[in-house]
Amino acid sequence: MTARRVTDSGRPLAFSFDGRPYEGREGDTIASALLANGVRVVGRSFKYHRPRGIYGAWTEEPNAIVDVTFDGTTTPNLRATTELLKAGMDVRSVNAKPTADADRLGLLDRLSPFLPAGFYYKTFLWPDWHRFEPRIRAMAGLGRLDPSNEPPAENPMVNARCDVLVVGAGRSGLAASAEAAGAGKSVILVDDQFAPGGSMLYREVDGDARVEQAVADIARLGGRVLSRTTAYGIYDHNLVCCWERRGAQPDRQWRVRPGQIVLATGAIERPLIFADNDRPGVMSADAALFYLRRHGVLVGNRIVLAANNSRAIPIADTLREAGAHVTVADLRDGGTVDAVHGAKAVEAVTVSGKRLDADTLLMSGGYTPTVHLFCQAKGKLRYDEGIAAFVPGNPVEGVSVIGSAAGDFDDYAISPVWPKAGAKTRQWIDFQNDVTLKDVELAARENFRSVEHLKRYTTLGMATDQGKTSNMNGLAAMAAITGRTIEQTGTTTYRPPFTPVPFTVVAGRRRGELFNPVRRLALEAEHRAAGAVFREYGGWLRPAWYGKGDAADEVRREARQARDTVAIFDGSPLGKIEVFGPQAGEIVDYNSYNTISTLKPGRIRYGFMLTESGVIYDDGVTTKLADDHYVVSCSSGHVAGVVARLEEWRQDRFDPSQVFVHNLTPHWATLTACGPRAKRLVDALSLGVDLDDAALPHMGAGTGTFAGCPARIARVSFTGDRSYEVSVPAATAPALWAAMNEAGRVLDAVLMGSEALLMLRAEKGYIIAGKDTDGTTMPQDLGLSGPRDKRQGEYVGKRSLFTDNAQRQDRQQFVGLAVSDGGPALPTGAHALGSDGGQRRSAGFVTSSYDSPALGRPIALALVQRGLSRMDEEIELVHLGSVRRATITDPCAFDHDGSRLNA
Amino acid sequence: MQLFSCPFCGPRDETEFLFAAEAGKTRPEPAADVSAERWSEYLYLGGNPRGATREIWQHLTCGEFFAMERDTVTHVVSVSHSLRGEEA
């Protein structure tokens, strides 16, 4: 047994690692529990499958990456050093089969001469990389994802403001928080560890007590202290995102907008670079002190401590007091680490030419200030020769860096020992991504000398630890190899997140149903009770059809009956945008391709709305209720867009005091009765509106009352049959629904969903903007060029209708298609076949296609080049290799003279 | 996440705002007198300057369009003000 627990307190917790049972203590991390059990090999390296042990004590850990199964859920790629041990945890090493200790791919290490940095750019090229890729991909990667594990979307997000946000609750952070809170400022102090205190907890006498006092003082002054909360990113305008872990409760994301950010993020100890410095048992000296003081775990019995600085050397005495035999190799006096003996554990160490029996080699190459967040905030660094590290350079507005994060160490003296060129042995710089000094030399030789190129070519610093222990040594090595200074060599760019953050925390509740929430009908419950099957249409959850039978059969039943008797359809999502004021007529005219304001009050007009590019944005009807009151009824999916464009012109082009736009779509529910018996059904509702065709003709509107509420009635038809749209305040919708169903009973009425409606409108050749038109379709492509040719004055998109492109002869135009090969309905999306100098090319495509119950034959709508001048021409259509034939027709295939509108 | 300032509602996250146009952009009219080049410039070209710029944005939450001066390099928002009663 190499490591052991020297102070034993806390409840025992049983867990397993790589299938073997172990016992830890309450308060342990997975790492401290493994160390206490003498487990040396905890993982395999990414590329060479070298056995690896625990190096560090917190987020800097490069080696101890594990998959943890707890409570039936497997979470991959967790750092053993930052995970609290729980009873019953099943911990597995990653990148190792079957176990970290006996990994079958361990022999890869012997092939290392053939696998230098970037080997995959040079090998596997013949005959084709893709032949090798699947096997290499299978070997690459770390933990195993459990595809059945889809965590619930229950991670809250908290937006917070404060005067001062302090990151890091070590000595400096606690002091800064207390000072700010004492000055009356609102303070939030976040710290990622299990308890505030930072290195005070293991480096200072009575640290615990003084931390407790400091935290109590801050709380008394009104400050807020969040433990286990990682500030992982600083974004634009100093938004700080934090990840709070809350034990049994779901993790939480904090988005903090502080007036001032104080970074007291401390420093991370970096390794020394020597041969086989990656062996299990070679550890950070600081981590050894941490494990002893925080967890009562002594990491070894016979320890060699190699260090180049005054902060690490005294750790030897503490370890001796705990019972270890410690030999110090002080590199400040010219000492060297020449060799590490043993593969799966340190057996001996050769120091300055002398072989010493040892089970543990602690190293300290100095301390690197944790400047990640400062750099994310666009801070620039400066190399400080005195502490041999980069420290914050230029000031960043709203951000200050204090304590060891600013390079401010007490009594710190260092004689830097940087990697040297000409390595004969394998010396690890990046443990997790298996980058050695030789790899850095190779990169330099191949002219990848900028640190950003070095990073991408060798993958140095690209692992899940983002180079917390390796970047400094890597760039120092590149500096040495290329004869530049460290300052000239520079650092790579620091980007969020500081440490891996679960996607569940970033996504918060914006997942599943709440990712893009559907809009719901006032009558959803009534539709469900009537057997509706719901689908999403333009963001609204609407009945697609009713009934449990085969979908196609139910849709055909509804469509057929709608033509025979009367259908009841929920059209509530149809736009109901009210436009008021003296300039109301002008703005609806400007919005529309067709002039609207010339209508008589109480009349309705159909028209297009164009984009400024002349393309059909939407179609719909506009009702003129009075000279200063219009209702724009655009299609359901375009309501928000139409409101936005009206509002923009209202403020930009019109006098906002003379016109007002108000979206009342969700406030009104609309039920449509359509079909030959529609009038009888609406008559039974007693709305107090004269339904005589002379008083309320097709495209007429009236206002009545229903159940004591206003009811609007509009004769607009999307099916080609006589139709009445009845709109009432949404709260009154259930009463209207009941009344219409009651009235419909004797009329053999049918409930109709969206699918049947889409079929009926296609029989009539009525378009759905965006389905039967695309981003190039202009009104004249539908044969509607009247306003373009005659209308005076400005309207949106006007100039674009006269460009060379708009006047091309070969534009795709909107037509109907009649199947002429005796086959079934054409596939939607099938391409009309054209030719261009003998080459086959698309001359348009099918936009809608149905098997029409009313006509007893397939119908289709299409955009076809020059289609309007090719009536009755037979064309070929291709779809997925098969060829079909169809004849170009008028889009309207049913009731061509429109007599059913008044039948 | 940038912080923009609506002259009516105060500082809010940038996701509440919609870019409308660079300030000073006007719609060429009447259509019959507008050359294809001028129309194309109106439709498709922006100055997209590096550095200081003055733009029209809409705060979607309250619906108001306003002018905002900001720096496209440093992302510093210097000023935003209402457009009521003046030309953009």
Image (tube, rainbow, N blue to C red):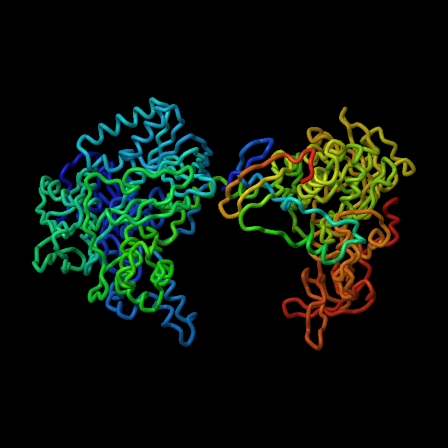
Residue A565, relative to residue A196: is it above or below? below
- How many dots with numbers? 0
Foreground pick, A4 / A463: A463
Quadrant of the frame with the C terminus of chain A: top right
Q: Residue at x 81, y 56 (%)?
A: A892
Foreground pick, A808 / A511: A808
Q: Is residue A262 left or right of residue A384?
A: right
Q: Residue furthest right?
A: A694
Residue A437 x, y percent position in the rendering = 26, 62
Q: Residue at x 84, y 28 (%)?
A: A688
Classify residue A215 by image quadrant. Answer: top left
Classify residue A219 by image quadrant. Answer: top left
Residue A167, relative to residue A791: is it above or below? above
Residue A526 x, y percent position in the rendering = 66, 35
Q: Residue at x 61, y 51 (%)?
A: B47
Q: Residue A300: tell me if it is visible.
A: yes
Q: Residue A853: tell me if it is visible.
A: no
Q: Is residue A73 left or right of residue A272?
A: right
Q: Is residue A621 left or right of residue A338?
A: right
Foreground pick, A114 / A693: A114
Residue A606 x, y percent position in the rendering = 81, 45
Foreground pick, A629 / A660: A660
Classify residue A290 by image quadrant. Answer: top left
